[in-house]
Amino acid sequence: MTFDIQTQPGGIHFQAESGETLLAAALRQGVVLPYGCRGGMCGSCVATLVSGKVSYPSGNTQALEGRDPGACLTCQAVAETDLVLEVMEIKTASQIEVRTLPCRVVDKQALNHDVMRLLIKLPENQRLPFLAGQYLDFLLEGGKRRAFSIANAPHDDEFIELHVRHVPGGQFTSFIFDALEEKAILRIQAPLGTFILREASTRPIILVAGGTGLAPIKGIIEHAFHIGITRPMHLYWGVRQQADLYLPDLPLAWAREHGNFSYTPVLSEPDTGWTGRRGFVHEAVLADHPDMSGFDVYLAGPPIMVQSGSQAFAAAGLSHDHMYSDAFEYAKPSGN
């Protein structure tokens, strides 16, 4: 059985299946409600039940203790009827609280010669609310920070996935590659940034990634699949050589599994025998789409790539209102 859930004051509607928590149902349909631990303990997700009936099959309702009878713990509550909830859905990145938290390194895996996949986990009973495409800062000694895009989508938040490229001479990335051990404790501030999917648009999507710019793009794509976006999406991934395509099978799998998704890798310094696209990635986009006026475009990667692409796409008719970019400016050292 399916139940209709309406929020106030926003008037958003979403559906919850029998046995599905309200929070899980909302996130599945791209409605971001406030939440924290997702275990019934922190109380971050508490809403007011205006009408309808819920139950708590898990029994994890510690956060309801001492609250008004109408309080509803959305991470544990299951709808028994249609509901009206008083809760502030999160429409933009600015509405999510930025938090400073410890995290533990769960896994590090070399994806190629200079990219490491890092999985980190927050303390037990803690989860990080974020929007696909946002990033985090590692907080280092002396007020220094190092920023990395979150590569997973919000619905898959048991771990936070990062793609770390080794920067020659970079002290922190060298530490991650050479010295950082699993179970090490680090401090982060997150979520940050406004490079997020504009879900209400109906325009076809072009996503342009340069190098590890794939990380936020990956989160956006996986979120789009999860919430059922059916408009066309085309990923162009620009790197120097074939070995720099550090997750080579993933975009191919997306293309096989989703009829609205297509993928074009582009090499600027192609290997001998490479039969695919060559040159700068934004040039490949323009060769396929000389009129850019009808698209939403997301660019993430080195500043020179984003700047070149932005200028070229604007000249091809793309409005700046439909151009969203993450030029990795935040990846530069910040703080003192």
Image (tube, rainbow, N blue to C red):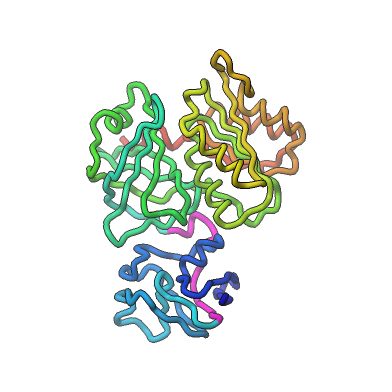
> From this viewpoint, is residue 150 visible?
yes
The residue lying toward the viewer, choosing from 307 and 129, is 129
> Is 53 inside the magenta-drawn segment?
no
Please state the horizontal and vertical placement of residue 161, each as a whole percent of the image: 39, 44
The residue lying at 43 percent from left, 37 percent from top is 330
Coordinates of residue 9 in the picture (x, y in percent): 56, 74
Residue in the picture at 37% in, 33% down: 116
Asked which quadrant contains residue 171, the reply is: top left
Q: Residue at x 70, y 41 (%)?
A: 319
Q: Is residue 262 above or below residue 270?
A: below
Q: Which residues are magenta?
A: 82-96
Quadrant, the C terminus: top left
User: Does residue 25 sit above or below 137 in this rendering?
Assistant: below
Decide if residue 7 is on the left or right side of residue 162. right
Using the rendered view, name the quadrant where residue 36 is placed: bottom left
Rendered location of residue 214, percent (x, y): 50, 37
Q: Nearer the viewer, residue 47 or 273?
A: 273
Residue 5 vertical position relative to residue 287 in the rendered view, above or below: below
